[in-house]
Image: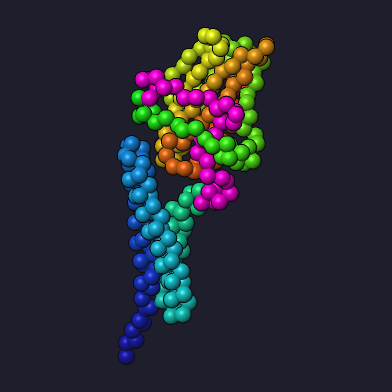
Amino acid sequence: MRHFIIEEPYSDSALWSRRLAFFATAVILTGLVLARLGLDPTAVLAVLGSAIVIACLAVLCAGAAAIAIWRTGRKGVGVLLSSAFIAALTLAYPTYLAFQAVRLPPLHDITTDVDDPPAFSLSHVALAARKGFVPLSVAPASRQLQLDAYPDVQPIILDLDADDAYQTVLHTIAALHWTLVEARPPGGRLGLGHVDAIDRSFVLGFPNDITIRIRPLAGQTRIDARSVSRIGRHDFGANAQRILAFADELKSEAEQK
């Protein structure tokens, strides 16, 4: 008499978890491509938000599959583990941003001079590069939040004359691969120099506007920078990191003079 071995079926929850995990990955990759193509940021964020929701559903299905497999002995452990791993990868960066949002104050405009922040150029060239965006002035209370959260963001003093400092700033912008928008060497009645640039975020490529003021001192030059996120009210610490990276590279360039 022939005996048939009936295999346990796969857990439906495990299979759904895998489907949702792969779908979330496809959606988030689509969002990244759309962001790089310059699609409206609101639409891009909506796509990415959908991917996060789908990835969360995949994690929930993986949890339900684990319970079902434990209780019924159904197959699908490998499926749920791979699904949970893929979903976790999808959620890793959003989770990091959520942690930064809790840890840091909701700021998107950071400067080395909280009392007199450098002003962005309002020339036709600069406005066209920023697509008409003009950063608003920041309330003193918000500036105090910056001082508390980012005490290392300070004016940069170079032991160079103003012209050499100006050239060093331009070399630094090139080294950081920022897009130069407008540059005015030190001079005029106040002797100030001014540079505007744009940097794009690493993951989504969203634009962030930077303005730099060059102020001659006695035998030195003071450099003040301001970095503003064009999109969103929370920069998750990115603008402070950008200014600190600029300061480090600027000092490194100055040492080669």
Image coords of residue 122 (percent x, y): 41, 22
Q: How many marks?
A: 0
The residue lying furthest to the front in this view is: 140
Nearer the observer, 224 or 144: 144
x, y percentage for residue 113? 59, 28
Q: Residue at x 44, y 42 (%)?
A: 232
Give the quarter of the figure containing the C terminus: top right
Observer able to see residue 16: yes
* Picture coordinates of residue 202, whole percent (x, y): 46, 37
Question: For residue 30: magenta?
Answer: no
* Residue 219 percent coordinates (x, y): 67, 11
Residue 82 appears in the figure: no
**Does the stretch in magenta take in 118?**
yes
The residue positioned 48% from the left and 14% from the top of the image is 184
- Could you tell me which residue is drawn at 45 percent across and 32 percent down? 135
Q: Is residue 20 left or right of residue 240?
A: left
Give the residues in magenta.
98-127
Asked whether 159 or 90 is in front, the reply is 159
Name the quarter where the N terminus is drawn: bottom left
Depth check: 26 or 136 in front? 136
Query: Residue at left 36%, top 72%?
Result: 12
